[in-house]
Image (spheres, rainbow, N blue to C red):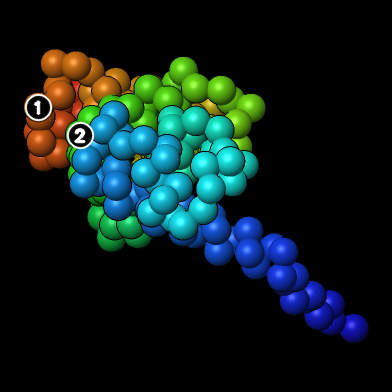
Amino acid sequence: MPVVPQPVGRRERNKQEKLARITQAASELFAKYGVDEVTTQQIAQAADIGTGTLFLYAKTKGELLLLVQNMHYAQALERGVAAAAKTSKTLAGLMALLGPIVECNRVQTENGRTYLREMVFGDPTEPHHAEALEIVAQTEKAVAELLAERENLDAASAATMAQVISSIMFLTMAASFNSQATAKEIAQRVKAQIEVILPH
């Protein structure tokens, strides 16, 4: 007998609605002013909730940024995987996969760089931080699968190379000397580094 999904209770619906309002408010304010110029009080007011309630969903402004950016990065990864499937060459596939992530990171450059800093140095026990690390893991898995298929690498070698490629992308996006670089320039620099390490 098929299992009938239980309807979501009112309490859970209220939580989901508040989370959606917080995400929307933080996303709009961060995009307009940058994460450093926005206060948690402004986000709470825009979401029409109390500051105390806000902290039940994210304890710090860094966690709020992770909450917002995780959604955008997950969507970028989906677009990248779909784009990579339409290519045939390894390098073209990798850049199709990573390109949307680079573009996502550069929508608001300081927010993007702060997001990477929070991802690396934030509290891994916080749920939004853990979610960010899971997106990184999914990205590396997608890269490893592409490498294994197109370069005929064994799983361990493909996974190691995927970690190297991931490191190249994140370091290039986070580096202070690239703070003024456009998404296109970042992608070109990532591509040049990946091209050197691909099997020949």
Can residue 12 be seen from the camera position used here? Answer: yes
Can residue 198 be seen from the camera position used here? Answer: no
Residue 169 in the image, given as x and y percentages of width and height: 29, 28
Q: Nearer the viewer, residue 2 or 5?
A: 5
> What is the secondary structure assignment of the residue under circle 1?
loop
State left or right for residue 169 relative to residue 144: left
Q: Amino acid at mark 1?
A: Gln
Find disc 2 in the rendering and name its residue: 109
State left or right for residue 156 relative to residue 27: right
Q: Nearer the viewer, residue 149 or 169?
A: 169
Residue 4, compared with residue 57, is above or below; it is below
Residue 31 in the image, given as x and y percentages of width and height: 25, 46
- How far apart are the alpha carbons under marks 2 and 1? 8 Å
Residue 6, compared with residue 132, is above or below; it is below
User: Mark 2 and 1 residues: CB-CB less than 8 Å, in contact?
Assistant: yes
Residue 148 figure quarter: top left
State left or right for residue 56 relative to residue 82: right
Question: How many numbered tags mark residues here?
Answer: 2
Which residue sits at x=53%, y=48%?
A: 50
Numbered circle sitting on residue 180: 1
Task: Sort mark 1 into few (<14), some (14-19) or many (20+) by Cα contacts within 10 Å.
Answer: few
> What is the secondary structure assignment of the residue under circle 2?
helix
Earlier residue among tags 2 and 1: 2
Q: Nearer the viewer, residue 29 or 192?
A: 29
Residue 142 in the image, given as x and y percentages of width and height: 44, 44
Task: Sort mark 2 into few (<14), some (14-19) or many (20+) by Cα contacts within 10 Å.
Answer: many
